[in-house]
Image (cartoon, helix red, strand yellow):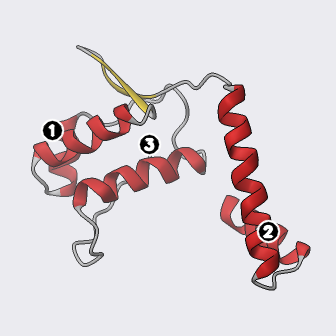
Amino acid sequence: MMKFYINPYEGVPIYGQIIKQVKMGVAKRLLKRGEKLPPVREMAIELSVNPNTVAKAYRELERENIVETIIGRGTFIKKMKRDSSGKEKIDKLIDMLILETYNAGYTKEEIINKIYKKEA
């Protein structure tokens, strides 16, 4: 289970930090599809925050289709289905990223190295 941390000096609301960490956990495969997140109260106690803050983060993650809440069972990382329209959107974003990085002076090798470092 992934550990969550809050930085009160980050300048980002606590619920936003929770959202960011869940998204990063999914992206880095620290949180697997179908994995259960800690219950709201448990997470609130662990982070020393109000349960409403954690609930707000979970609601936002659910709205963004990242998690799903099953009443009586908990909140889980959503199992994603492949979406061709989503893939097209990502392809366009990648194309834009490549163009912007080339314009900023990065070489192909530098871009690839940065991507591999982010996976670790």
Residue positioned 36% across, 50% down in the render: 19
Tag 3, which secondary structure? loop
Q: Earlier in the sequence, mark 1 or mark 2?
A: 1
Dot 1 crowding, Cα within 10 Å, few <14, some 14–19, many 20+: some
Tag 1, which secondary structure? helix
Q: Which residue is mark 2?
A: 99
| Percent x, y of residue 100 | 73, 72
In this rendering, position of residue 87 left or right of residue 51: right
| Percent x, y of residue 44 | 17, 47
Quadrant of the image for the N terminus?
top left
* Distance from Cα at disc 1 to Cα at disc 2: 45 Å
Q: Amino acid at mark 1?
A: Arg
Look at the picture and state if 51 lies above or below 5.
above
* Distance from Cα at disc 2 to Cα at disc 3: 37 Å
Dot 2 crowding, Cα within 10 Å, few <14, some 14–19, many 20+: few
Q: Amino acid at mark 2?
A: Leu
Q: Which residue is mark 3?
A: 1
Q: In this view of the protein, which residue sits in the foreground, 96 or 120?
A: 96
Question: Residue 117's image quarter?
Answer: bottom right
Q: Earlier in the sequence, mark 2 or mark 3?
A: 3
Q: Nearer the viewer, mark 2 or mark 3?
A: 2
